[in-house]
Amino acid sequence: MSAKNDFFSTSDVLQIFRQLCAGLEHMHSLEPPYAHNDVKPGNVLLTYRKGESPLAILMDFGSARPARRQIRSRSEALHI
């Protein structure tokens, strides 16, 4: 987009952020809750329809793990 001197509006940025937060909230509400562990711009797919706000889709769940772990020893805590 920067090569075309095109940028997201503030409204679109907030919409993308809201959608990503909703996706993460869903992951955290699962039983057991899951953590994505690799949220970054490269793991967000944006789709567009002319005249509409972008749709943000969180991808790459290879690092996703159950969010809560019981730590049983000092060595396990240091490893994590």
Image: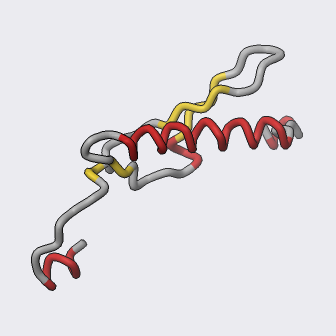
Q: Quadrant of residue 22?
A: top right
Quarter of the rendering occupied by the N terminus:
top right
Residue farthest right in this picture: 5
Q: Nearer the viewer, residue 40 or 65?
A: 65
- Against 41, is 48 above or below? above
- For the view shown, which residue lies furthest in the bottom direction? 74
> Residue at image x 24%, y 72%?
80
User: Residue 79 vs residue 57: left or right?
Assistant: left
- Judged left or right of residue 50, residue 63 is left
The answer to whether residue 26 is left or right of residue 74 is right
What colour-coding does the image apply?
secondary structure
Of residues 21 and 29, which is closer to you in this image? 29
- Tell me where residue 48 sits by quadrant: top right
Q: Position of residue 18 (x, y in %)?
A: 65, 40
Give residue 43's position: percent from left, percent from top. 50, 42
Residue 59 percent across, percent down from the top left: 45, 36
Say which of 26 and 14 sits in front.
26
Q: Residue at x 11, y 75 (%)?
A: 72
For residue 53, above or below residue 80: above
